Image: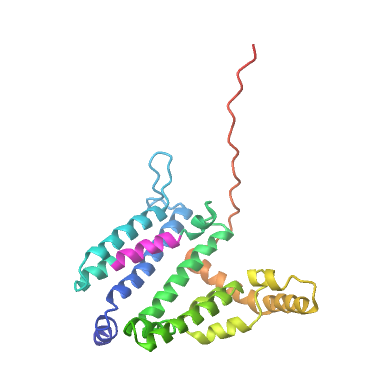
Amino acid sequence: MTGWFERTVVATDRLPLFCFFVGVIVGFGFIRFSVRMIRARVRWWPGNITPGELHIHHVVFGVVFMLVAGVAGLVIPVETTSWRAVAAGLFGIGAALVLDEFALLLHLSDVYWSEKGRTSIDAVFVAIALSGLLLLGLRPLGANEFLTRGETDPAQFAGAALIGINLTLAAITLLKGKIWTGLLGIFVPVLLIVGTVRLARPHSPWARWFYRGGSRWAERRRVRAAARERRYRQPIIMAKIRVQELIAGRHDLPLPRPTRPTRPPRPPRR
């Protein structure tokens, strides 16, 4: 095991990336354990940090960790791999804390335990998956040619063209509502080809743009997309939700109702 780690991670200068990967997993695991204990109201867990009446969300600590680790990564010499790895691990912990409240940043509302809060879990899973693929040595198509060749080498221009094509197909796939296919396809291009050719999801931007017309072609596409969503996509989503609830807890609370500001009483007329 030690020999494999030395050959695969240390010798290939992936130790900082490995520490970032571990930091994301450890940070996410810790904070989800913490919020579930807070939600269960157990006595032996310290609970939320609320100086006065201010509730400090853990995204604040995540931003601080990322800033400290990011600046440290810029200051630490490149040859000091061990300290760069420590900074990368701290950056991963901060990233986990930020992504765990991604839904709060997206909606600018405390939707942590509501249905919309599942977006945070998806964001963390995406970060773990993409960093794991990078750790395994996978790179976007054309990245090696673009980064390792000289400025005038024709292979670099070919690499840039491949990256452009890859990103274009990824954008189309994402617009069709296939998030995982679009992101993982950056590293496995065959997924992008499949995602680009296949039908879009019914509520995706692509479907709103091209499946809403009155033509027979648009109607057939809309009906087929809805049938495919019910038959294939919904069971997969339900399985994903069960995995999310097993790891991160249930997200079934209703959204808090916005409170209207109270007006001060008017002074009596004289």
The residue shown at (53%, 78%) is: 168
In the image, residue 91 lies at what x, y percent?
33, 64
Task: Judge whether 252 appears above or below 197 on screen.
Answer: above
In the image, residue 154 lies at what x, y percent?
38, 88
Q: Is residue 70 left or right of residue 194?
A: left
Residue stretch in magenta: 88-100
Residue in front for this viewpoint, 1 or 149: 149
Q: Is residue 239 left or right of residue 58?
A: right
Is residue 99 located in the magenta-colored stretch of the structure?
Answer: yes
Residue 34 at least partly seen: yes
Task: Judge whether 6 appears above or below 129 on screen.
Answer: below
Residue reaching furthest front?
Answer: 152
The residue shown at (79%, 76%) is: 215
The residue shown at (74%, 70%) is: 212
Residue reaching furthest top?
Answer: 270
Is residue 51 located in the magenta-colored stretch of the structure?
Answer: no
In the image, residue 151 lies at what x, y percent?
33, 82
Quadrant of the rendering where the N terminus is positioned: bottom left
Which colour style is shown? rainbow
Q: Quadrant of residue 50?
A: top left
Quadrant of the rendering where the C terminus is positioned: top right
Residue in front for this viewpoint, 188 or 126: 188
What secondary structure is the magenta-colored segment mainly? helix
Task: Judge whether 183 appears above or below 106 on screen.
Answer: below
In the image, residue 149 lies at what x, y percent?
33, 85
Q: Quadrant of residue 150?
A: bottom left
Residue 185 at least partly seen: no
